[in-house]
Amino acid sequence: MKKLLFILAICLPAFAMGQTTIDRAMSVWARDIVNANFTEVYTNVTSNDVDIAANVVSIATNAADIDTLEAANAVSFMQVIVDSSETIALTEDTWAIVENATSTLWTSSGAGVTANGDSVTIVTAGDYFVSLSLSFKATADDSIQVAVFKNGGRATAPAETQLIGTETANLAVSGLLLDLVAGDDLSVRIQNTASGDDASVKNGSLVLYMLKPD
């Protein structure tokens, strides 16, 4: 019995010390797990904050683009020829601007552009859709083309018709005008590819719709 008590007296303190060491190890392990989880949560929250901030900026940018687009399309730009007839002097295979002597043939304008009488100046940069309709009178066997030009160069495919007799015809042109910048000059031009006969323009319209502002 005395031997048993002696053994217990020696072993129990050692066991208690071992248990304390285990408890301490468990405490450190638990602390490390909590710290790791906290770090992960903080990282995720910080990352989400960055994503949210980027999304807010993107939404604001998109809203500004929409506001610009709505403002530009509040009034679709249209030029209309008010003269009942205007003779355009033509040289065979040479493009001529559809205009009159006083550069007042084209009238009316809208947001994003300015009418200059014989052309249109872009005010708001962006991508546009253009639609042109032109009615004119020419003589037999004339082959007439019309197109939209930008800064003196053709910007759309030409529309063409060949007349059978002296008659009135109508041509329509449409297309995309991409990456226009402020100051770009658009004009309507006509040519006779069969002869040097003149054409008499009756009426027409040029409509520009902004698709996307820059």
Image (cartoon, rainbow, N blue to C red):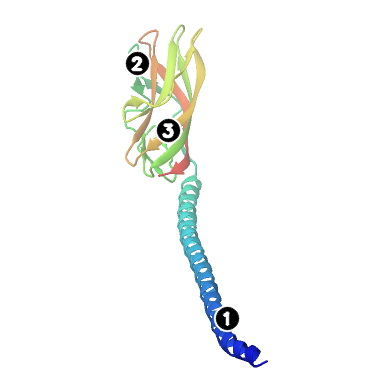
Q: Earlier in the sequence, mark 3 or mark 1?
A: 1
Residue on which the image places disc 3: 177
Spatial separation of the CA atoms under disc 3 and disc 2: 26 Å
Graded by Cα atoms within 10 Å as few (under 14), some (14 to 19) or many (20 or more), the crowding at tag 2 reads some
Q: Is residue 132 above or below residue 36?
A: above
Mark 1, secondary structure of its residue? helix
Spatial separation of the CA atoms under disc 3 and disc 1: 82 Å
**Residue drawn 39% across the image and 11% down it:** 193
**Residue drawn 55% across the image and 77% down it:** 22
Q: Are marks 3 and 2 in contact (CB under 8 Å)?
A: no
Rendered location of residue 79, percent (x, y): 45, 35
Say which quadrant the N terminus sits in: bottom right
Find residue 90 and name its label: 2
Q: Nearer the viewer, residue 46 or 59?
A: 46
Say which quadrant the C terminus sits in: top left
Q: Are marks 3 and 1 in contact (CB under 8 Å)?
A: no
**Residue drawn 49% across the image and 50% down it:** 66
Residue on which the image places disc 1: 19
Question: Which residue is most to the bottom?
Answer: 2
Rendered location of residue 159, percent (x, y): 47, 19
Graded by Cα atoms within 10 Å as few (under 14), some (14 to 19) or many (20 or more), the crowding at tag 3 reads some
Mark 3, secondary structure of its residue? strand
Would residue 212 be seen by someone viewing this image from the given angle?
yes
> What type is the residue that disc 3 sits on?
Leu
Q: Are marks 2 and 1 in contact (CB under 8 Å)?
A: no
> What type is the residue that disc 2 sits on?
Leu
